């Protein structure tokens, strides 16, 4: 970590400066004395004690590790400013591609030989007996069907960790195919202008479940269920329609974990989870249906990309170890610390283990060209009265609040209209039986925010609609009256 202590910072913040004053050695050492240096709350609570001890030159105990005068002054300035949490600026990290054994690339950048090896690995998994734990059927079936165990870790903090472990298990199975020991799972960059045609070549184009297994998967899918997706032209249009690139840019601009992840305490769909759900809905009948989404070969390249984006966020905001990751949290770390809560079955990992990029997962992602560092200007519907605020004159936030997602049998789309003009759309990804899922029941009521241009609204009435995504790929209106008691709320945005 950068120590940030060579020059005096007049108005430091915790996330940009102060958290880097403490390394893993400091954190582990002081935790024995009941002092938490790993989180904002812990440092703020102990700030005066830290200031006194560092100025007395008694902490850290080793003379070579003691703070410089500039660092002491910066910490004093933070205390003087009442310990602001702040935000962090993304940094350009040093990539680890040269030091790891698994380098995951953009599928559009693979050579012919790499594509051939990848096809061999996929086909090898698909050809295995379905009761083989490393078969395509067995591993894809962990995502929901055929059951009976349901492993749904969506719309919560464990979403990214669970899927990171899932990708590792799938990649290990690819590498277990004879001759494919060096293969890695590439990612599909959903923001790229062109969709690689190789994704529509066998065996990446479709997967058919054997007739005798269809009843295990679900009777509504019929015999010989074959995965289906949108054609390239439709998929490109859908990606644009959902605004997925803007979703990703906004998520990567947030330096707080909960803002990036996008599932806050108010159960509002946002961040990278919103981008993920929109992507599933854009993909077509199978990818949009959690029951069978993982049987769609595109799922694996699609999800490697979401893991890549989380990986990038960790590197950009220096959150690649468990201790540094905790410093980005807004709402506590129990989901990482509790020995029961942090499990992510059926995998032999915990949420905490998936976060440490240096020791647990010997892999990294490389980009065919430098990707830009994104940043966003946060807009708020409410802010602390202790600071001056400005009111946006051209933007509004419209929230469809308190939607009972358990009443909706499958993934769905929320459309917001001003009169007859479509102002925005958001997808929500779930099973056709959300009531059967413990994770879904914990997050039963959800809300959707739309940031709209006031001029687009004019004097037209606002209205929202819910469209249910049927397993056959069609959509049908779902009455809002059956979704609990949802409301439309309009807020002025504050800067």
Image: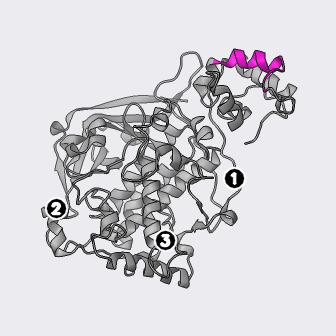
Q: Position of residue 89 (x, y in %)?
A: 66, 41
Q: Nearer the viewer, mark 1 or mark 3?
A: 1
Please name the residue shown 49% across and 71% down the image. Answer: 194
Q: Nearer the viewer, residue 60 or 409?
A: 60
Please name the residue shown 34% across and 66% down the image. Answer: 133
Q: Nearer the viewer, mark 1 or mark 2?
A: 2
Disc nearer the start of the sequence (1/2): 1
Q: Nearer the viewer, mark 2 or mark 3?
A: 2
**Which of the labelled discs sits on residue 194, or is there none?**
3
Q: Mark 2 sits on what residue?
A: 218
Q: Position of residue 105 (x, y in %)?
A: 56, 68
**Which of the labelled discs sits on residue 34, or is there none?**
none
Q: Position of residue 100 (x, y in %)?
A: 64, 64
How far apart are the two marked residues, 1 and 2, measured between alpha carbons?
46 Å
Q: Mark 1 sits on what residue?
A: 93
Q: Which residues are magenta?
A: 46-60
């Amino acid at each position: 970590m950068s120590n940030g202590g060579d020059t005096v910072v007049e108005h430091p913040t915790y996330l940009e400066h102060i958290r880097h004053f403490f390394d893993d050695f400091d954190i582990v050492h002081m935790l024995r004395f009941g002092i938490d240096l790993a989180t904002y709350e812990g440092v703020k609570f102990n700030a005066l004690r830290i200031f006194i001890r560092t100025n007395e030159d008694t902490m850290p105990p080793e003379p070579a590790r003691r703070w410089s005068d500039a660092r002491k002054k910066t910490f004093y300035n933070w205390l003087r400013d009442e310990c602001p949490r702040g935000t962090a600026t993304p940094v350009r990290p040093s990539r680890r591609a040269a030091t790891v054994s698994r380098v995951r690339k953009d599928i559009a950048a693979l050579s012919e030989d790499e594509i051939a090896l990848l096809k061999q690995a996929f086909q090898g998994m698909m050809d295995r007996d379905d009761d083989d734990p490393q078969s395509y059927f067995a591993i894809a079936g962990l995502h929901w069907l055929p059951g009976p165990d349901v492993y749904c870790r969506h719309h919560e903090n464990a979403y990214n960790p669970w899927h990171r472990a899932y990708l590792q298990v799938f990649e290990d199975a690819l590498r277990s195919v004879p001759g494919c020991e060096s293969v890695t799972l590439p990612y599909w960059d959903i923001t790229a202008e062109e969709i690689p045609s190789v994704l529509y070549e066998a065996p990446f184009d479709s997967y058919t479940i054997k007739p005798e297994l269809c009843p295990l998967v679900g009777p509504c899918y019929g015999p010989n269920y074959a995965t289906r997706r949108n054609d390239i032209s439709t998929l490109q249009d859908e990606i644009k329609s959902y605004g997925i690139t803007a979703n990703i840019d906004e998520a990567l601009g947030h330096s707080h974990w909960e803002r990036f992840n996008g599932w806050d305490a108010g159960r509002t769909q946002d961040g990278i989870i919103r981008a993920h759900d929109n992507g599933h809905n854009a993909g077509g009948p199978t990818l949009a249906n959690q029951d069978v989404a993982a049987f769609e070969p595109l799922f694996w390249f699609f999800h490697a990309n979401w893991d890549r984006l989380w990986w990038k966020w960790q590197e950009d905001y220096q959150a690649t170890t468990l201790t540094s990751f905790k410093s980005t949290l807004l709402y506590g770390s129990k989901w990482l610390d509790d020995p029961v809560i942090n499990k992510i079955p059926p995998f032999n990992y915990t949420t905490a283990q998936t976060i440490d990029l240096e020791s647990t997962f010997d892999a990294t992602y490389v980009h065919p060209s430098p990707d830009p560092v994104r940043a966003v200007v946060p807009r708020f519907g409410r802010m602390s009265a202790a600071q001056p605020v400005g009111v946006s004159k051209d933007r509004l936030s419209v929230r469809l609040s308190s939607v009972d997602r358990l009443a909706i049998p499958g993934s769905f789309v929320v459309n917001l209209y001003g009169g007859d003009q479509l102002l925005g759309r958001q997808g929500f990804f779930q099973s056709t039986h959300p009531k059967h899922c413990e994770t879904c029941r914990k997050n039963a009521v959800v809300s959707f925010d739309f940031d709209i241009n006031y001029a687009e609204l004019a004097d037209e009435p606002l209205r929202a609609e819910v469209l249910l995504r049927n397993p056959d790929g069609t959509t049908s209106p779902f009455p809002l009256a059956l979704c609990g008691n949802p409301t439309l709320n309009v807020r002025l945005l504050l800067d």
